[in-house]
Image (spheres, grey):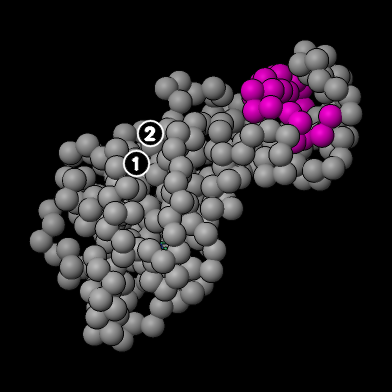
């Protein structure tokens, strides 16, 4: 979809874009193809797109024979999309708030992939919601603020390593990322954008119940980054359980959350999950 096409649809329909909904539309065909390549669409595959806007990525995904479900919050865009894609048998359009819908109606996303240029205001909670679902998608390719992507792929012992990194790493490995220049969007966003691809591990590292403990553990450990982890965890677990886990992992009694590796958080969650409340 070219820039003048986007502008003329907006003008014809008297649509003034809403900044709070992150309405920055991608009009660079090379970047759209790059996102679709990263999403690795196979013909007939079920793809979820959140925030189709006026449908530039939607068109590319349908050209690659995806069985596509797109979720858009803005009625004015939904009406435009219904006209643009009226003859597409493989296209399902939902008019709703994607985050509220994902929370309210958790689904089995086992065989699905996400391919989306996400609304930046709700991009992180949407990815986390999908990642922590009992049945997360097999792959997620998403465009977000570069700052969020940096947090997702962050190594331990850095300022950007934290809750976002660890909640997504619980189920996914980041396998690819690339920057998308601001000039590829209309209007140009004030922040830098990057596309990241996350691939689900072949086997889950934690059961769904262990995952709940892991989420509590990670959130509490990073609730005050500068504090010694064990002091924070005392709010939730008994001292004996924490002592046993500390010995099992051979962790420093003075350790802060950012110095604990992802694999150590997983082991710690498994140990604490078994301990009495
Ligand atoms: N995919 C399009 C593109 O690349 O040009 C548009 C991307 S734009 C960054 C984000 C889109 O998400 C907008 O169309 C916006 O209306 C929509 N949106 C914002 N919040 C949403 C939400 N909570 N649920 C569903 N769609 C949302």
Span of residues in magenta = 255-277
Q: Is residue 63 above or below residue 28?
A: above
- Residue 211: x and y in percent read 59, 30
Looking at the image, tell me whether mark 1 or mark 2 is earlier in sequence order. Answer: 1
Q: Is residue 154 above or below residue 119?
A: above
**Circle 1 is placed at which residue position?**
38
**Circle 2 is placed at which residue position?**
138
Question: Dividing the picture into quarters, in which one does residue 9 lie?
Answer: bottom left
Respond yes or no on whether mark 1 lies under 8 Å from ligand 1: no
- Which residue is rendered at x = 84% and y = 37% of the image? 232
Q: Does the segment drawn in magenta span residue 37? A: no
Q: Residue furthest left?
A: 87
Q: Does the segment drawn in magenta span residue 269? A: yes
- Judge whether residue 134 can be spotted in this image: no
Assign the N terminus to one quadrant of the image: bottom left
The label shown at residue 151 is: none
Q: Main secondary structure of the magenta part?
A: helix
Q: Secondary structure at mark 2?
A: loop
Assign the C terminus to one quadrant of the image: top right
Q: Secondary structure at mark 1?
A: helix
- Judge whether residue 237 can be spotted in this image: yes
| Distance in Å between CA atoms under marks 1 and 2 | 13 Å
- Relative placement, left or right, of 87 versus 101 is left
């Amino acid at each position: 979809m070219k820039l003048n096409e986007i502008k003329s649809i907006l003008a014809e329909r008297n649509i003034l874009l809403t900044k709070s909904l992150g309405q920055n539309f991608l009009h660079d065909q090379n970047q759209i193809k790059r996102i679709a390549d990263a999403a690795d669409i196979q013909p007939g595959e079920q793809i979820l797109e959140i925030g189709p806007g006026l449908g530039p990525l939607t068109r590319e995904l349908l050209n690659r024979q995806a069985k596509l479900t797109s979720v858009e919050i803005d009625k004015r865009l939904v009406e435009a999309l219904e006209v643009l894609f009226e003859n597409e048998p493989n296209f399902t359009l939902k008019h709703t708030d994607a985050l509220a819908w994902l929370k309210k109606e958790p689904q089995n996303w086992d065989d699905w992939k996400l391919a989306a240029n996400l609304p930046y205001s709700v991009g992180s909670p949407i990815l986390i919601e999908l990642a922590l679902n009992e049945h997360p998608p097999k792959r997620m390719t998403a465009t977000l603020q570069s700052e969020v992507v940096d947090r997702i792929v962050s190594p331990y012992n850095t300022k950007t390593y934290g809750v976002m990194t660890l909640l997504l790493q619980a189920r996914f490995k980041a396998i690819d990322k690339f920057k998308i220049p601001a000039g590829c969007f209309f209007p140009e966003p004030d922040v830098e954008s990057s596309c990241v691809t996350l691939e689900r591990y072949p086997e889950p590292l934690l059961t769904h119940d262990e995952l709940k403990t892991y989420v509590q553990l990670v959130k509490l450990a990073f609730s005050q980054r500068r504090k010694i982890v064990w002091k924070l965890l005392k709010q939730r677990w008994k001292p004996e359980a924490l002592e046993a886990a500390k010995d099992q992992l051979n962790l420093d009694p003075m350790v802060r959350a950012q110095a604990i590796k992802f694999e150590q958080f997983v082991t710690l969650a498994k140990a604490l999950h078994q301990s009495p409340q």
